[in-house]
Image (cartoon, rainbow, N blue to C red):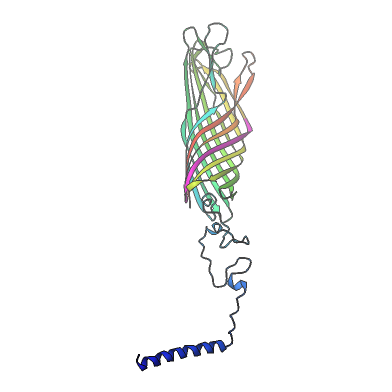
Amino acid sequence: MPRTCWRWVVAVVAGCGAAGVANAADPPSTLPAIPPPDMRLGDVHGSAPPGVKDLTPPGFGDLIPPDELGHSHGGHGEVPGNIAPWAPDGPGFYTSVEALVLRPRREAFDFLVRNATPGLAVAGPVESLNYELRGGVRAELGYRIGHTGWDVFTQYTYFRSGAQGAVTAGPGQALFPTLTRPGLTDAALVARADARLEYNVYDLALGRRFRLDDNFTGRAFGGLRFASIHQGLTAVYDGLDARRAVVSAPSDFDGFGPVVGAEGVAAGWRGFHLYARASGGLLTGQARNPLSETNDAGRTPYVGTSYDLRKVVPVAGVGVGGGWQYRTFSLRVGYEITHYFDLTDQPRLADDLGRGAVVTRPAGLSLEGLFVQVGLQF
């Protein structure tokens, strides 16, 4: 090997040895001090270290699991994302529209007895009217108050229905009217009856939404209801004792009162949920129940009276169903029943000798059927 190459090798080895001896002779340097816990990982209360900004998006704070001390990082006191659509945090308007398909049912809706024997016996069914299945609408508009969970809303329900019935006596038969004054129009051969229902209900209430757990939310509410319910009933009889005899027995109720209720949602997979609601209240108002009867095509009056009173009407309602919600849009389908207890007090003359023998027939009103609700939150 050339002499110049050996010189380079000897120089490199000597330099490395000298560096090792120098490092071994130097005293060890002092290690840097470990910062206190509150500068390194935050204090024991879970606050972020200085200079570090919490970038957790709003609405997801409660989705981050707590640490070993049970402290949540980045939480904002909001509900989990799968519950947020039913218990939203923050102010804003919300609205819903429901298509109703209801069948009203009324008590004391009879107008004759179909008698099948020519003798004195009464043997036959009692014929009553039945309201038709019709459509209606319910609209709601509300506002969520701040971040409190409280909301105020107003609701309006509109519904109309009617009923018709006609009966003709067969050979050897007779029809016994149940609405006419006894002793005057006791039998007929033909009968026809018509009825109508006009239903308008207004609600104004204050509600409170709350979370039960990660899959259930609830809402309690209370307020005032104003109800305007009008029912008409007219029966026409002809043949035998009846000569175009007409009986009119409408019933009107207008009242208001407190109503309370609650609703709950069980959240499921991908926005699908189950839904239930119930409400009840007492309405005080004026009930008007006029009664008139004529014969001979209106030329001979038999009855012209009215039973008017101020009364308290209990009301109760319940509904169940399911639906789907995507962000601020919701769709629900369910079945509901609403009942007004003793809504009408129809007067009837019960004695052919005592002209003032008047009895009343209390009658409740029910509305039951399907609802399809479309809702939107802002």
Task: Specify whether residue 375 is in view.
Answer: no
Task: Specify whether residue 92 is in view.
Answer: yes
User: How far across and how far down the image is residue 292, in percent?
Assistant: 55, 22
- Assign the magenta stretch its main secondary structure: strand
How many tags in the picture? 0
Find the residue positioned furthest to the top: 119
State the residue at coordinates (52%, 30%).
104
- Residue 192 vs 11, above or below: the answer is above
Residue 316 belongs to magenta span: yes
- Residue 37 vs 110, above or below: the answer is below
Find the residue positioned furthest to the left: 2
Residue 86 belongs to magenta span: no
User: How far across and how far down the image is residue 266, in percent?
Assistant: 55, 44
State the residue at coordinates (51%, 87%).
20
User: How far across and how far down the image is residue 158, in percent?
Assistant: 49, 37
The span picked out in magenta is 309-332
Viewer-side residue, 269 vs 374: 269
Q: Is residue 11 left or right of residue 352?
A: left
- Residue 54 vs 156, above or below: the answer is below
User: How far across and how far down the image is residue 175, in percent?
Assistant: 51, 13
Picture quadrant where residue 44 is located: bottom right
Picture quadrant where residue 285 is located: top right
State the residue at coordinates (55%, 51%).
87
Viewer-side residue, 158 vs 124: 124
Quadrant containing the N terminus in the rendered view? bottom left
- Residue 302 vs 264, above or below: the answer is above
